[in-house]
Amino acid sequence: MNLSDYSKMNSPRTLFVVLCFATALVTGCSDDEFAVAPVNGVVKCNGEIVGGGVVYFQPKQVGDSAVVGKIGLGVIDSQGQFTVSTYGTGDGAVVGTHIVKVGKGSGPGCDCAMNADRMVMEVEVTSGPENTIEIELPKKTRQDARAEQLEADEDDDDDDE
């Protein structure tokens, strides 16, 4: 796979298709549900609210079990807030340890790294009524900037068609 193939896979349009497909899978597989707990929070860059994007809560494998549950997704609103959904709208994330990633999606983004392939933090989702997470995005690296530029170039190419 060359670099342009990779950038095509990470365009906002591809992200939307993946999110739709993931939602269809999540809602259609209720027999194998793991316990979930409500998760919400806010995303910040240099202490300022980030409007727009997607937060991914990826259950982390712990011990010998390869079965860890489904990825939870949260859309970041214009106020920087998100609510995670895994099996149904706003139901939360699977109870346990998660790797958190944040993607730019179709939002305006910010000066920090919003790369859906980059781990931002690790969190523990506990059973109970509330898991409130504040995500402070890391500084953008050269690799993040290159990935964003490739995505922007791909979007420009799509607009020309």
Image (tube, grey):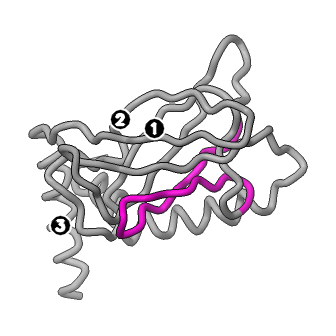
The reply, left or right, for residue 134 in relation to residue 155 is: right
**Tag shown at residue 152:** 3
Stretch of the chain drawn in magenta: 69-88
**Magenta region's main secondary structure?**
loop
> Going 73% across and 19% down the picture, which residue do you hit?
65
**How far separated are the C-alphas under marks 2 and 1?**
6 Å
* Residue type (three-letter) at the residue carrying disc 3: Ala
Q: In this rendering, would 110 be left or right of 41?
A: left
Q: The residue under label 2 is which amino acid type? A: Val
The residue depicted at 30 percent of the width and 40 percent of the height is 136
Element class at badge 2: strand
**Mark 3 vs 1, N-terminal side:** 1
The image shows residue 68, relative to residue 152, as above or below, that is: above
Q: Would you place residue 28 above or below residue 65 in this image? A: below
Does the CB distance between marks 2 and 1 fall below 8 Å? yes
Name the mark on residue 100: 1
Q: Position of residue 7 (x, y in %)?
A: 27, 56
- SS class, disc 3: helix
Name, please, the residue furthest toward the top.
63
Residue 25 locus on image (x, y percent): 71, 59
Mark 1 surroundings within 10 Å by alpha-carbon count, few (fewer than 14), some (14 through 19), many (20 or more):
many
Q: Earlier in the sequence, mark 2 or mark 1?
A: 1
